[in-house]
Image (spheres, helix red, strand yellow):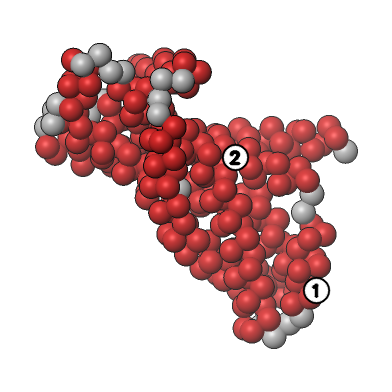
Amino acid sequence: MKSFFSSLGELFVYAAVVARRVFSRRYSWGSLVHQMHRIGVESLTVVNLCAFFIGLVLVVQTQSMLKRFGAETQVSKVVTASFVREIGPVFAAIMFTGRSGTGIAAELGSMVVTEQIDAYRVFGVDPVARLAVPRILATVLMLPALTVIANVVGIFSGFLIVVFGLHESGTMYLRNASEILAPLDIVCCIVKGLVFGFTIGLVATHIGFKTERATEAVGTSTTRTMVQGVLAILIVDLVITKGFLLLGEAGA
């Protein structure tokens, strides 16, 4: 417990340092755009592929369960609500962690091992502002976009299997899907993407900078990023979900 709270405290202190560097504008806009492409655009394939097959499986499983109660026509509502509220943001964040978060940790860890971080400090360059901030901002900006695209892909894959696999009405599927969504669901989805993106970027860069000076330590940092990143996503997801549920109940 002591080690856990110590690590948590270090992460909060690091988050405060990152926040100050963001507002100090000591990072390059060119570096930010480059990281947005590397971290976001290059993750499109793996995130969308995951969302596509999850949508297929979800429709098959949901249709099989609802058939027992004679409610097969509600499959689109269940799939759409599940994807936008929970499955899309969480799975996009997990795949994003595996694809980009671990890459960030490995890259910064390698720079620590090869003493490039020390070279930055010797020349008076702040490694947090130069290296961490563009990567964290890129994860914050790109993950919400990836989440929205993943939701569209997942719902569309469900549409395909309903029309061509289950031979049901595609028009009814789309109508029911649009009816079930509320503005608060979309806001919740985007907020989750923003917070998950910040969490992933923060955890990945923090672990990367803390890499020990040994070759095998880079692999250890990569593994820690995946494990701690996914755990942080699930905890934050619970908090955000509960918050928006209370908000929805208060609005009703």
Which secondary structure lies at badge 2? Answer: helix
Relative horizontal placement of residue 108, taking residue 244 as reference (left or right): left
Depth check: give the residue in front, 72 or 69: 72
Q: Is residue 58 above or below residue 216?
A: below
**Residue found at the far right of this picture:** 252
Quadrant that contains the C terminus: top right
Q: Residue at x 69, y 85 (%)?
A: 167
Q: Is residue 46 above or below residue 172?
A: above
Q: Are marks 2 and 1 in contact (CB under 8 Å)?
A: no
Residue 109 position in % (x across, y down): 23, 33
Q: Residue at x 34, y 22 (%)?
A: 128
Q: Residue at x 56, y 57 (%)?
A: 150
Relative horizontal placement of residue 29, taking residue 163 as reference (left or right): left
Residue 216 position in % (x across, y down): 14, 39
**10 Å neighbourhood of mark 1: few (<14), some, or many (≥20)?**
some
Q: Is residue 204 above or below residue 72?
A: above
Residue under circle 1?
172
In 3D space, how far apart are the residues under numbered discs 2 and 1 (Cα atoms)? 29 Å
Residue under circle 2?
192
Q: Hey, what amino acid is under mark 2?
A: Lys
> For residue 72, what is the image quadrant?
bottom right
Which secondary structure lies at badge 1? Answer: helix
Q: Residue at x 60, y 70 (%)?
A: 157
Q: Is residue 248 above or below residue 165?
A: above
Depth check: give the residue in front, 237 or 128: 128
Depth check: give the residue in front, 181 or 166: 181
Residue 120 position in % (x across, y down): 22, 21
Relative horizontal placement of residue 74, taking residue 139 as reference (left or right): right
Q: Hey, what amino acid is under mark 1?
A: Met
